[in-house]
Amino acid sequence: MIEITIWDYSNIVSKWLIYIGTAAAIGGPFIAALINTSVNKKSIFNYIIISSVLGFVAVIINFFIQVGAFSETGLSGMFDTDMMSFLWQSAVGDSVLWRLIAFAVLGLALFWSNLNTKYGMFNFKHAAFSVLYVAAIFGFVYSFTFIGHSADLGGVAKWLLAFHIFTVSWWIGALYPLWLSCKLLQPPALYKLMCLFGQIAMYMVGLLIVCGIGLLFLFLANPFELFTTIYGLAMLLKLIFAVSILLIAAYHKYHLVEEVQQQGGIKKLQNSLNNEMLIAAIILAVTAVLSCILGPLSLI
């Protein structure tokens, strides 16, 4: 029986917020860049900023939570300087540093996108923004290679996880901007955006599936552990939700997209995106639980 402490709960919530911030930071600007520069993208910009600030703060809070958990001296243990120094010099500190740098670089990229442009008409296609944005993405995905189950396996597992994080974050982070686009864009422009997103998503889904299957093979000794262990059952739950979100996406691509050229179709798309965002939030929550309190050790 796994004993869950208040530190575990706090760790799960803060990591969930980190995942949300990372997803918004990766997926949000991508969708904004696909939208015509003449459209006022203030609402999408605000989504990216608020989520990124939330993620940045969650990274810092999560570090202090881990300090407190390791210190084992109660709430005051969060400020144990010796333990802070120890963790900062470990892989945990490396991960925190890269995430903070990534959020800071993204902030610089967003500042650049608003430079010399009318407020709300952010230029997400400027070369300088693109370079900073890609650098921020690298920082985010690289931060996940230092800690977690894949870090123990090393090599291939670390980079499979990195690409998995990238594709999942891109997908989930794009959902709310797509929902906002239903309000911002006229039907022809929305139809064009959804078609383009669907074409790109096909390649991203392929990468997501390959990385996901590869990680399962590395984490599980045999497929039956999906049904016979706590870790396997949690992974199975995540897989069920992942398949659900892919089925919704397929429904968008092969059915709803054609209807968005009519007002009724746009409403259907918004409702469907709402469902997809809810499932995405659950997927991130399950991922946080897997990261914090479950792992290959729970296979025993």
Image: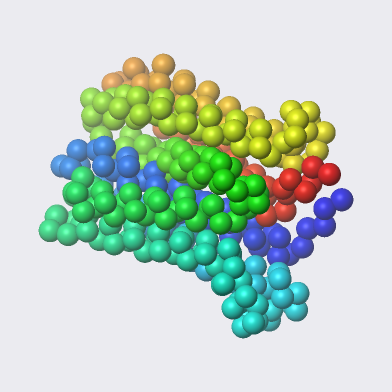
Say which quadrant the C terminus sits in.
top right
Q: Is residue 203 above or below residue 36?
A: above
Q: Say whether residue 3 is left or right of residue 210.
A: right
Question: In the rendered image of this protein, does residue 185 appear above or below residue 62?
Answer: above
246 or 127: which is nearer to us? 127
- The outermost residue toward the right is 1
| Residue name at image x 69 percent, y 59 percent | 9
The residue that appears at 31% across and 51% down in the rendered structure is 133
Q: Residue at x 26, y 51 (%)?
A: 131
Task: Locate residue 226, reporting x and y percent.
Answer: 75, 32
Give above or below for 278 relative to 291. above
25 vs 287, left or right, is left
Residue 183: percent from left, percent from top: 31, 37
Q: Position of residue 151 (x, y in %)?
A: 61, 52
Judge left or right: residue 136 versus residue 120. right
Q: Is residue 264 visible?
A: no
Q: Find residue 195 and report its image quarter.
A: top left
Question: Which quadrant would residue 261 be assigned to in this image?
Answer: top left
- Residue 50 percent coordinates (x, y): 40, 58
Work out whether residue 69 or residue 267 is closer to the camera in this orientation and state it.
69
- Given residues 239 and 137, the one toward you in this image is 137
Q: Which residue lies at the image location 82% right of the left edge and 33% below the top edge?
A: 228
Camera sees residue 91:
yes
Foreground residue among 128 and 251:
128
Please determine whether, in this image, residue 291 is positioned above or below residue 242: below
Here the colouring is rainbow
Total marks shown come to 0
